[in-house]
Amino acid sequence: MREDIKRLLLHLIAPTRCPVCGDFIRPDERFCPECEAELTVWNGEHTIPGADSFTAAYEYNDAVKPAVMLLKNGIADNADYALGGALHDRLKENGIIENADVILPVPMTQEAVSERGFNQAVLICRRIGKLSGLPVSECLEKQTETLPQKTLNKAQRAVNLRDAFTVTDPDTVKGSRILLVDDVCTTGSTLAELTWQLKFHGAKAVYCAACCKTPPVRDDEELPDNG
Ligand SMILES: [Zn+2]
């Protein structure tokens, strides 16, 4: 079934809501117009060591936070549709979509996926995949739970991530131009670690992306629970 028709049918059963304020919206809308007007389009510069680019759709702030929290609390609702769609549009604008071969979500441990019900990065990747036609591969795995990055200083954060991830299908990675996607990027240390692994396994390019990027933080500042 066509996706827009599927969304329309779903909308008749459970009307589509704005993932920020909860108001009813049309099934083809991402946010209500009032909330969308409050969002800050990300225009910053951020470098992920080893990566070929970094793209974000929105700056992480109080205006977008309710949508991100829906995902983090295991309620995708319309948030994956809205945030994934917005990130897709940015990646299309800056030419990444046409250069990438495959989309890879930043992984969560099996335990974390069971607890939440889904990996929000996977949902966002599927949305980008639907809009772009690019395949999504879950060939990255996180075996061990790392400590929340926000509880650590810079040096501890780097050590914390070492050996946490593996590439389960090196053939997908070798020679590919990879779009690596997360929901929120804070320091970028998780993306940097995964970029290193993907390049080690022969990725031709790694384009990092996140729906939201936090403003630059100091080492002692509190971060959202993300890498
Ligand atoms: Zn709204």
Image (cartoon, helix red, strand yellow):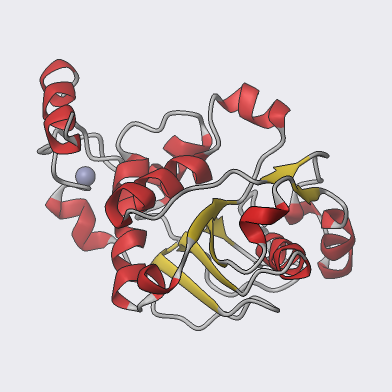
Residue depicted at 63% across the width and 69% down the height: 175
117 to the left or right of 84: right
Q: Residue at x 13, y 43 (%)?
A: 28
Instruction: Report whether residue 13 is seen.
Output: yes
Q: Position of residue 7 (x, y in %)?
A: 18, 31
Residue 121: horizontal and vertical position, in percent? 52, 46
Quadrant of residue 9 within the rendered picture: top left
Pick whichever, 105 or 31, lies toward us: 105
In which quadrant of this rendering is ligand 1 seen? top left
Furthest toward the bottom, the residue is: 45
Vertical side of 142 occupied by 116: above or below: above
Between 191 and 19, the one lying in front of the other is 191
The quadrant of the picture occupied by the N terminus is top left
The quadrant in which the C terminus is found is: bottom right
Q: Quadrant of residue 41?
A: bottom left
Q: In the rendered view, would you say 219 is above or below 223?
A: below
Along the line of sight, which residue is nearer the eye, 43 or 143? 143
133 to 208, vertically: above or below: above
Whole-percent x, y for residue 152 in the image:
82, 58
Which residue is the extreme one toward the top? 13
Q: Is residue 38 left or right of residue 202?
A: left
x 72%, y 70%: residue: 199
Task: Measuring from the top left, give residue 38's x and y in whole percent.
Answer: 25, 61
